[in-house]
Image (spheres, rainbow, N blue to C red):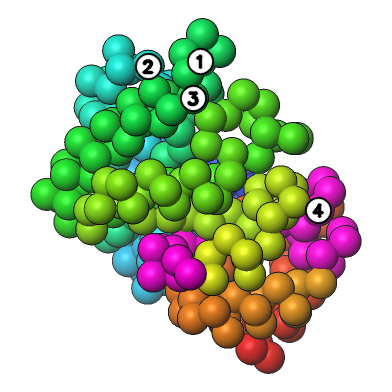
Amino acid sequence: MKLSASVELLFREAGPDHGERIRAAADAGIDTVEIWQHSDKDLASIEKALNDTGSRLWTLLIEGRATLADAKTHESFLDNVRAAAVVARRLGCDRIVTGSGVGLPYMRRAVQHRTVVDALKAGADIAAEHGVVIVLENLNTKVDHPGTLFDTTAECLQAIREVGSPGLALLYDMYHSLQMGETPEREVAEAIDLVSHVQIADLPERTEPGTGEIDWEARLRSLRDLGYTGPVGLEYVPTTASLASLAHIQQIAAAL
């Protein structure tokens, strides 16, 4: 099973330049990487590092973190989709990440859901025109993202099905899912075709696999048995040096 590393959280020992972090990841045997926002980064350095190492950028974020339940945010959201899509294509990346944003306490949930779907549909059309896919991420409200509207995998999948576009798929974040009491067997067994990427971190502290309470061998085997064939993204806060933090999950992934 292939692994992908978020160079926002991993390989910080290489310094602030994300190109250098990509090189450090490649030296550690990981040639698939992820970044968050693009506007604060040296894109030329990232592009050169990707080319020099033969690495691939798997995801980057759509900036803005818009509250998509508010229709007044949709224009800026779509502008951010366009900007992310252009950068993604430059860097050879196929997936741009968003969440639903927070909910609005004064509006019925069903109305909010439809409003988010409207934004995602328009965004998916733009993404498809640029040859990329928006991946909608489930985010937990119990620990990390209080107030997020789409905090369950089921609601994300419902929205993706309602949009019905090749420009929209699921980023199944297993850490957030497990924090919400979900399991991959329940959540994505009937929707693996809609899962474009998976990310993991251990519970309860979002640290590296092997430091918490999750049996990652069982979880990743289950994911593989469900039919997921893409890389597994490592988006955790390491408790030790990045290279040392990889040992447990690399051993498991190599055996699957």
Q: CA distance from mark 2 to mark 1?
A: 8 Å
Residue 119 is situated, as x and y percent measured from the top left of the image, at 28, 31
Q: Which mark is residue 109?
A: 3
Residue 26 at least partly seen: no
Secondary element under disc 2, as helix, strand or loop, is: loop
- What is the span of residues highlighted in magenta in the rendered image? 190-214
Query: Pointer 2 and pointer 1: residues touching (CB < 8 Å)?
Result: yes
Of badges 2 and 4, the one in the foreground is: 2
**Mark 3 or 4, closer to the camera:** 3
| Res 75 visible | yes
Indicate whether residue 68 is drawn in magenta: no
Q: Tell me: 179 left or right of 172.
A: right
Amino acid found under the numbered disc labelled 1? Leu
In the image: residue 30, left or right of residue 146: left
SS at circle 3 = helix
User: Are discs 1 and 3 less than 8 Å apart at CB?
Assistant: no
On the image, numbered disc 4 is attached to which residue? Answer: 203
Query: Residue, x 17% and y 42% (percent of image)?
Result: 126
Q: CA distance from mark 1 to mark 4?
A: 28 Å
Mark 3, Cα crowd under 10 Å, few <14 / some 14-19 / many 20+, is some
Name the residue that disc number 1 marks.
104
Q: Which residue is mark 2?
A: 70
Q: Residue furthest bottom?
A: 255
Seen in the image, is 91 located left or right of residue 136?
A: left
Pointers 1 and 4 in contact (C-beta within 8 Å)? no
Observer-nearest residue: 100 or 7? 100
Estimate the spatial distance between the alpha carbons at disc 2 and disc 4, rounded to whole Å: 32 Å
With 19 as the anchor, is 75 left or right in this view? left
Q: Earlier in the sequence, mark 3 or mark 2?
A: 2
Q: Mark 2 or mark 4, which has the lower sequence index?
A: 2
Quadrant hosting residue 132: bottom left
Cα separation between marks 3 and 2: 12 Å
